[in-house]
Amino acid sequence: MTEANTEIKDAAADAAAGDDKQNADAANAADKAAGSDKTNDAAADAGKADAAADEAAKAAADAAAAKGDDKEDKTAALPDNWRELAAGENEDQLKLLKRYGSLNGVVKALQEAQNTIRSGKIKRDMPDPKDEKAMAEWRKEQGIPDKPEGYVLPEPVTKRLVDADKPVLSSFTEFAHANNLPPDFVAKGAEWYVAMAEQAAEVQAQNDAKASEDVEDALRDVWSRDEFKGNRMLAKRFMESAGDIGDVWTEARLPDGRRLGDIASFVQWASDQGRNSFGDVVFSSTDAEAKHTSRRTEIEKTMKTDIDKYYAEGMDKEYAQILDRDTKRGAR
């Protein structure tokens, strides 16, 4: 160790002990160190200056601990250029040291930094994915589960899930696991998705309700008041007759989001197809058809058992209408 470094160490120790005479010696020693070209060259060497600062910090800390006085700044007698001596030619270190008013403050900052690192609040970078052991340790530190199913979603999210959401979130957790995303990120992502899906469903329901009102208004303009109900029933029955799917196909959506059953021109076409298939609005529903068939059977029975009543009550005319409807319908 150089003479200058020894003197700096002695000066720091004497300052912590509170010896006035030694404080003066320490100041003189520091001045001597600053005034000597040879010593200044040594202090300019970054490695030697760092060692000098470490010795000074250790001596000051030991002296302060021995005396037990935390209220008094024990580094007050250090030379004014102690920061320059410690940093040497390293400008970044000098800027850092200038943030602190005393060497004691530097020591405290170092201790706080070490405690923060040990607490785990500072996460280390992900290691090389090829190193399976290091990756397993790192994933455990991050709280990443072993499998995608290990992510635990918040209860407020799981309560709001519907069946359509489950495959989407399952795909999301698989993506998150493959990309080493932490649980907090996955939980927030799931929360966003559920809120977005609920909002989209609410908007869609409002649009559908308005579309239903619009198609009804449009059809009332096309059909008369007397025709409206019957034509709608014919359209509905034709839609229901579509094989195994029934009228569910009317829920199919166009690229613009409208349901097929909410388009006026489609409903009109379905009504025409219903009239072609069933012959008359009287067959627009199964109940109406049953009543029609029942009335035909009743009239035919009266015609065979009480022909006078058959003609007296005009059943002959009604029966002719029934037969005409059946003919148009294609049923005999």
Image (cartoon, rainbow, N blue to C red):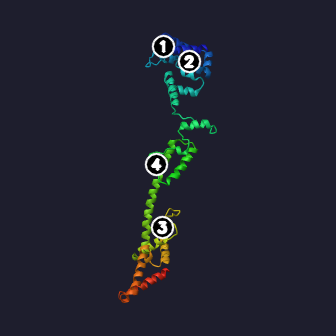
Mark 2 lies on a secondary structure that is: helix
Spot occupied by residue 46 in the image (x, y as percentages of width and height): 61, 23
Local crowd size for mark 4, using a 10 Å CA cut-off: few (<14), some (14–19), many (≥20):
some
Q: CA distance from mark 2 to mark 4?
A: 59 Å
Q: CA distance from mark 3 to mark 1?
A: 94 Å
The answer, for residue 230, to whether it is visible in the render is yes
Q: CA distance from mark 4 to mark 1?
A: 65 Å
Front residue of 203 and 84: 203
Local crowd size for mark 1, using a 10 Å CA cut-off: few (<14), some (14–19), many (≥20):
some
Tell me which numbered mark, 1 or 2, is placed earlier along the sequence: 1
As drawn, the label of residue 55 is: 2
Q: CA distance from mark 3 to mark 4?
A: 33 Å
As drawn, the label of residue 261 is: 3
List the residue tagged with mark 1.
17
Which label sits in the foreground, 4 or 1?
4
The answer, for residue 125, to whether it is visible in the render is no
